[in-house]
Image (cartoon, rainbow, N blue to C red):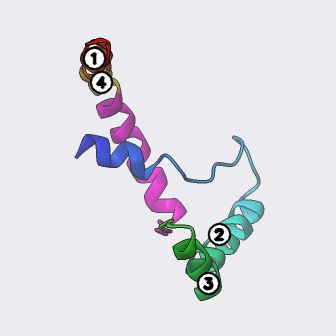
Amino acid sequence: MGLNDLFELDRVFYAPPKTPDPIVKDLREAIKKASLDPKVNEEAQKQKLVIMFMDGEEVQKRIPDTMRRGYSLKKILAQAMDASKEKAKK
C-alpha cells in the first residue's frame, strides 16, 4: 500500500504555498476537465499512458500519511536497490 500511495502522488500538480484560493480553484477545475476529456485520454492511450484523476482535496488528505510511510520505506528501497546492483554485477 505504501508504494502505491507514493506512486499515486508522483504525478500530481502542486501550486506554491499561499497560492490564492481562487487560483487554486481554477487550477483544480482545469486539471479535472483535462483529465476527464475523452480526446486527452484517447491520446494518452495511444502513448500507453494512464490518466487517473484524483481531486486536489483528496491529494491533500493523503500527503501527510503517504510521506510518513514513504520515509519508513526509504531503508527498504535502499536495500532493494543495493541487491539489484549486486545482482547486475554477476
Question: CA gap, disc 2 to disc 3?
Answer: 10 Å
Q: Position of residue 38 (x, y in %)?
A: 58, 87
The question of residue 69 being in magenta is answered with yes
Question: CA gap, disc 1 to disc 2?
Answer: 34 Å
The label nearer to you, 1 versus 2, is 1
**Amino acid type of the residue tagged 4 in the rendering:** Leu
Q: Quadrant of residue 33?
A: bottom right
Label 1 or label 2, whichever comes before in sequence order: 2
The question of residue 66 being in magenta is answered with yes
Question: CA gap, disc 4 to disc 2?
Answer: 31 Å
Q: Identify the residue at image location x=32%, y=20%.
A: 81
In screen coordinates, is 81 left or right of 83?
Answer: right
On residue 31, the disc is 2
Label 4 or label 2, whichever comes before in sequence order: 2
The residue that mark 3 highlights is 37
Nearer-the-camera pick, 29 or 7:
7
**Amino acid type of the residue tagged 1 in the rendering:** Lys
Q: Which residues are magenta?
A: 51-70
In screen coordinates, is 23 left or right of 1?
Answer: right
Question: CA gap, disc 4 to disc 1?
Answer: 5 Å
The residue that mark 4 highlights is 77
Label 2 or label 3, whichever comes before in sequence order: 2
Q: Identify the residue at image location x=46%, y=68%.
A: 52
Q: Identify the residue at image location x=76%, y=65%.
A: 22
* Residue 14 to residue 81: above or below: below
The residue that mark 1 highlights is 75
